[in-house]
Amino acid sequence: MRNILFFNEIYPIRNEFTHHSAIATGVFDPLAKQLCGLGHDARIVANPPVLEKLLTTKSSPGNRLIHLTVDEFEDVSKLVGNWALSGRHLWREYVVGETRDEYSVIERILTRIYNDVMQFEFVVLWSHNEYVGNLVRAFGATPVFMELAPMRRPFPMSLYVDPLGVNGSTALNCQEFEDYAKTLEPLSDLHGFFERRNADPMKHVNPIDHLYSFDAHRKVEEKIRTRGERPKVLVPMQIGDDTNLFAGSPFGDTDDFIRRLIPNLDRSRYDFYFKPHPGAVNRGGWVALDQQRAVDRLTNAGFEVLETEVDESTYLSFLTCFDAVVTINSSVGFEAMLLGKSVVNLGNAMYSPSGATDYHAVMSALDEASERKEQNLRIASAMFKICLLDRGAFISDATSFLERIEAVSQFNENSRSEYFELIGQKFPYQTWIN
């Protein structure tokens, strides 16, 4: 029997106590329910508002949920602050593993759980959290990091599990993974990847069992193909307080990214097109204001800013309109790799094992990026082989989940290549393509 704690983020991200409630109800709870059915001890710890949502669904009996004490929740509530100023910086330091008195309540919560509730062997976290990861290791347990794969619809919905973190903090972010990728055959092309398949060894509706149109995204194509023969470069914006942005790059927010980047762009050699993030508008408040500042800065400098929304049905053909992508560490970069595009990362990303490019050198990196297209496809192949998991199948199969976290517990910093081989054998890429 295994003791597994699902740590649904307790910190009030963006001053919200329910920010990860969908993870609790849609990922952690289904897994915990199955694990308990298999005889394991699986519990969920979360904020009171999230636990209330779980109790409302009536799928989680009270004995599977770990409540905070009144004193603990009071101390967690003290982390609420001015998000636009000190709040997001306090969150950033927490995520990257800094130690501050304000975070000690998290340690007290985990200590109480370990001593009085369950001696957890695994603690499953959603997204990156080095502070909690370090605490878990201090208990002699294994932190398990989960996150959505770096691709969105219409790409297949998938996720990944990692021993070190997410995005630029994953175990894949190293030269050993790039070397491992060189040993694999690359995906032939994305048309084949999305081709309709009849057999499905996983016995469920395969999320990539669809046909997607590669017809021209006419609105964008008409706009960019009339600008001459210079290569077309897409620069997607990220949400200004995105953990991947401030924990995996030198930029403080979206406007800071644009402010530093555009003086280094040579418009006589490339045409640049900037795409705002739709989530920034939907989120509103400081995040929307940060993006609007960036858009105003671009407009004043004479750069082309595209429409925020791109329909799912035309997203693939939208990406095919461009020759290259320059991004911090957005999922758009990985999606572009799958389409055979040149990609330059200005931040740490799981699909860029060689690391980030200094934004001052973005032009030379663009010139050299076209030479890495085949290697990009090999990296993408390796990610599918050992990392990306069908989200629906994985969440509904507790046995595969257990096998995966057991593999994570065997990770050794000094023998990463052995870890890649191990999970490549246990979770073969063929489960996606057959």
Image (spheres, rainbow, N blue to C red):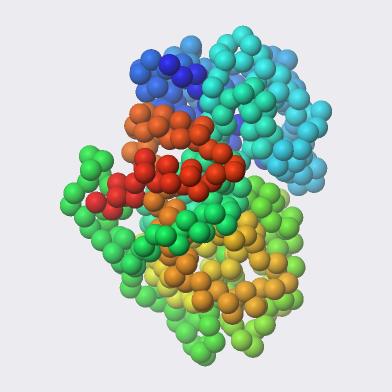
Q: Residue furthest bottom?
A: 228
Vertical arrangement, residue 411 with respect to residue 359, above or below: above
Vertical arrangement, residue 420 with respect to residue 231, above or below: above
Q: Residue furthest top?
A: 116
Q: Quadrant of residue 82?
A: top right
Q: Between 183 and 172, which is closer to the camera in this rendering?
A: 183
Residue 301: percent from left, percent from top: 71, 78
Residue at 36 percent of width and 33 percent of height: 400
Q: Residue furthest left?
A: 198
Q: Quadrant of residue 217?
A: bottom left
Vertical arrangement, residue 26 with respect to residue 233, above or below: above
Q: Between 171 and 258, which is closer to the camera in this rendering?
A: 171
Q: Is residue 84 left or right of residue 420?
A: right
Q: Is residue 150 left or right of residue 185?
A: right
Vertical arrangement, residue 307 with respect to residue 250, above or below: below
Quadrant of the snapshot with the N terminus: top left
Q: Is residue 392 left or right of residue 267?
A: left
Residue at 43 percent of width and 23 percent of height: 32
Q: Is residue 289 left or right of residue 124?
A: right
Residue 136: percent from left, percent from top: 63, 27
Q: Between 197 and 306, which is closer to the camera in this rendering?
A: 197
Q: From where the camera sits, is residue 434 visible?
A: yes
Residue at 65 percent of width and 84 percent of height: 267
Q: From where the camera sits, is residue 240 visible?
A: no
Residue 197: percent from left, percent from top: 21, 55
Q: Quadrant of residue 356?
A: bottom right
Residue at 40 percent of width and 22 percent of height: 35
